Image (tube, coloured by chain):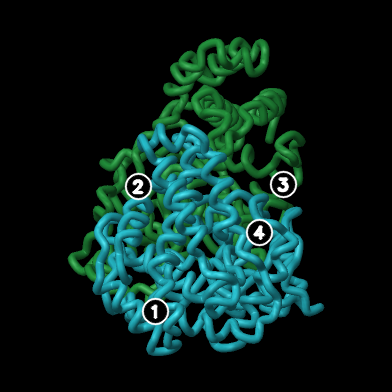
Chain colours: A cyan, B green
Amino acid sequence: MAVYTELAAETLEAFLGTYGIGLLVSFHGIAEGVENSNFLLRTTEGDFILTLFERRVNASELPWFLGLMQHLAGRGLNCPLPVSDRTGTALRTLAGRPAAITTFLPGVSATQLDEGLCLELGKSLARLHLAGDGYGAVRPNALSPAAWAPLLESCGESADALSPGLTAEVRSALRKIEEAWPSVEALPRGQIHADLFPDNVFFQNGQVSGLIDFYFACTDFLAYDLAICLNAWCFRDEKTFEPSFAAAILQGYESVRPLTKAEKSALPLLCQGAAIRFLLTRLYDWINTPANALVTRKDPLAYLVRLRHFAGAAHV
Amino acid sequence: MAVYTELAAETLEAFLGTYGIGLLVSFHGIAEGVENSNFLLRTTEGDFILTLFERRVNASELPWFLGLMQHLAGRGLNCPLPVSDRTGTALRTLAGRPAAITTFLPGVSATQLDEGLCLELGKSLARLHLAGDGYGAVRPNALSPAAWAPLLESCGESADALSPGLTAEVRSALRKIEEAWPSVEALPRGQIHADLFPDNVFFQNGQVSGLIDFYFACTDFLAYDLAICLNAWCFRDEKTFEPSFAAAILQGYESVRPLTKAEKSALPLLCQGAAIRFLLTRLYDWINTPANALVTRKDPLAYLVRLRHFAGAAHV
């Protein structure tokens, strides 16, 4: 969590002058989003989020992300709506960086999960998948199975330093999952969020009031998004699988979009894949982030627990 | 700028339940205040700032600061008003830290200063000084002249490494200023902000809408607060003195609270003292902050420029 770019009020006021969203009342850099600088703006017309996209984001992909959010919000999903300036442009430049203003969403992320929240999360995920229909542009998943082996090998011996035998165990699991991975036509595909962790979901009065942070979104198996959520939402203390949470997510999801038979039978494998994906990116970040950096490093081994769980499960 | 403490929504909701300020709608860690963790809260009743006081703040002094803000806000000053819980307590504990909720102030800090803003700043500073009257508790200035020599000596040879001859120049200036410093009875005293830099002043439509960050406030010469502002607001690009800015601050100040003759004649000396004080704390932070820390180190030498300017000035 960090704000990387400082912004002068006068610069922001001039920038806002090119939009039709009122005059600046206040703005505060907010400590959200590891990758970008985010500011909470209040204008005489309402509240907005200004995002300055920092180095790690590929600027050429921003139109795809902003277009997806416009499409989803236009279909009634509670996601940030990119706001266009007076010339109709949503992707702008500010302080030398790509920049976009979106609507502000109320609500707070949950840290104490329960079946009720998981049920609502499941419904929202399915609504996101249905709403994505008709957004034709494809963004391949940059963290698909093809990316995993190179990511593991790039960690070299550091993985075993973290936990002896880790490299061999992951390499073996990875091969099995890669071989069994469904072919492109085997399962329904569409636009997926691909990072719908609890901190990217806002709740208000027990209902989902916002889905945020679409900068990992891509075109992939819809059920893979569900597998990511089963990893992210169903392990108490990052350790213990909660079958009732998983059941609630599936129930919520299927109340909006029933899964096909093929999706259901692929789910344990997709869950193992999702566990590997987060294990590997966390491992990479763990090795490449100085221990004294202000960004909190997340424990890769929490995903080894998940990988082992799903590898041993006949069904989710 | 940093948020040090993470806070779970459920923790915050339970905490808010002990206040009478509505239900939580949203909250965001804001990247303001180097010393503390600040959160912008929205409730069903309005906007508030939650501050968690981190290590560098002396917890035993918090009642004095909060009491001062309550006193000033009660007298109509646009400063954060500490909000009391249902039992009448403003200083609480949250996440193991002293914590307080205050009202939210609209407005933005200016980075492009001009005479008009300086005039308004001067008026606000004088209003603060008048509003402080009647707040009887005394907090000695921990960064008064007595603190300067030990601070300089603690920097050792690092000062000369930054700029050859710096230690000798500052030591000599410091002795002269210390010797000439007014006695306690010589000038009007009261509650001063002691850190009223442009980032602690919010403007809206050219008027001051908020004075914030009272955690250096103390009981000292009122004119010393003015000297701090003349240092903080009147040097373009941290280099060039702007006589018209200084004149505007003084004009604004005196339109609310005329200076005594003794204050006017002491002002060049007080300005040198203020320059030394910020030179020394910046020097100390420069030496003791790793160059790769996310906190921006501020250049101490910008205050050597000011010290030299005010030492050579017959009047401000």
Q: Secondary structure at mark 2?
A: strand
Q: Are marks 4 and 1 on the same chain?
A: yes
Q: What residue is shown at x 32% (from left), y 76% (from top)? A: A117
Residue, far right: A87
Q: Secondary structure at mark 4?
A: strand
3 or 1: mark nearer the eye: 1
State which quarter of the image contains the C terminus of chain A.
bottom left
| Alpha carbon distance from label 3 to label 1 | 59 Å
Q: Which residue is mark 1?
A: A122
Front one among A156 and B126? A156
Side of A19 relative to A120 (left or right): right
Q: Amino acid at mark 1?
A: Gly
Q: Amino acid at mark 2?
A: Phe
Q: Which chain's residue wears label 1?
A: A
Badge 4 density bin: few <14, some 14–19, many ≥20, Cα 10 Å = many
Badge 1 density bin: few <14, some 14–19, many ≥20, Cα 10 Å = many
Marks 3 and 2, the one that precedes in the sequence = 2
Front one among A147 and A294? A147
| Alpha carbon distance from label 2 to label 1 | 38 Å
Residue A205 in percent (x, y) is at 33, 81
Q: Are marks 4 and 3 on the same chain?
A: no
Residue A139 in percent (x, y) is at 66, 68
Q: Amino acid at mark 4?
A: Leu
| Alpha carbon distance from label 4 to label 1 | 30 Å
3 or 2: mark nearer the eye: 2
Q: Which mark is residue B245?
A: 3
Q: Is residue A42 visible?
A: no
Q: Which residue is mark 2?
A: B53
4 or 2: mark nearer the eye: 4
Q: Which residue is mark 4?
A: A52
| Alpha carbon distance from label 4 to label 3 | 33 Å
Marks 4 and 1, the one that precedes in the sequence = 4
